[in-house]
Amino acid sequence: MKPVIGILEALKINDENKPYNNYYKLTNLYVDRIVENGGLPLGIISADDEILNKCDGFLLPGGNRITKDHYKIIEYAIKNNKPLLGICAGMQSLVMYDYLYNECLKNNDNPNYNDLYNKYKELEKNDVSILKKVENHGGDLSSGTMDATLDNIKKSMHNIIINKDSILYSIYNKDLIDVISMHGYGVYNTTGLFIPIAYSDDKVLEAVQYKDKFILGLQFHIELEKDNLIMKNFIEMCKKIIWLNKNYVLV
């Protein structure tokens, strides 16, 4: 049975003067990689429980915003043992969830995604962020002043160093790989729920994982690579979760 992978919409285009320019955008690259590896993609516009219950795993793609739905999907994946893959802004939402959860714990014994989102808006209003501007991780590609053509994207490749006690190392069986990064902002550490597992040479955090689940955040862009080992392992893990939770036979 093919696993259903819920993809949170990456961008909302809103032009009230042009009603047909009012839409959600989902990049085909994520859809293609899921299909190639045996999954069924399902676009998520609103993360209500009925939709989330239909999903066997989740992908939080790159984009330009973090919403309440990011926090709800992360919380749902943790509580229901569903694999999750966060890419670029998707990884940053995992690190923000980690930070906000720790902040909310100071005043609330069991914060939920609503508490985290409210704390996020409070920090945003006070211009507080754990995201820091970085250089040489996409540069003009990240700012939008350079087109993201294949030739330009290749210029943003760099090495990352992988922790040997991590999901990434178990996938690649090596501690140094080349990746494609196109982000203008990054983070340098986590606060508890998520474990740092890969850094770039300049100490920017490039990957995180949840303690004991296949919930993985990547600052780099595996959707640009066909036959990517991380995506293959992600889909395989979703198949295993179907079998464990529903006693289906893997196909």
Image: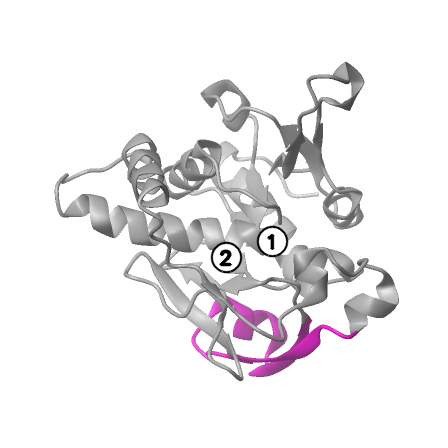
Q: Residues within 10 Å of mark 1 (few under 14, many from 20)?
A: many
190 relative position to 34: left or right: left
Looking at the picture, tell me which residue is in the foreground, 155 or 7.
155
Label 1 amino acid?
Answer: Phe
Q: Quadrant of the C terminus?
A: top right
Q: Position of residue 38 (x, y in %)?
A: 74, 45
Mark carried by residue 216: 2
Q: Image check: 54 left or right of 14?
A: left
Q: Amino acid at mark 2?
A: Leu
Position above or below: 54 against 105? above
Task: Write down the region rendered in magenta.
Answer: 155-179
Q: Is residue 12 above or below residue 57?
A: above
Q: Nearer the viewer, residue 5 or 208?
A: 208
For image coordinates 45% across by 71% down, the residue present is: 197
- Tag in front: 2 or 1: 2
Question: In this picture, is 201 found above or below 116?
Answer: below
> Which residue lies under the disc numbered 1?
234
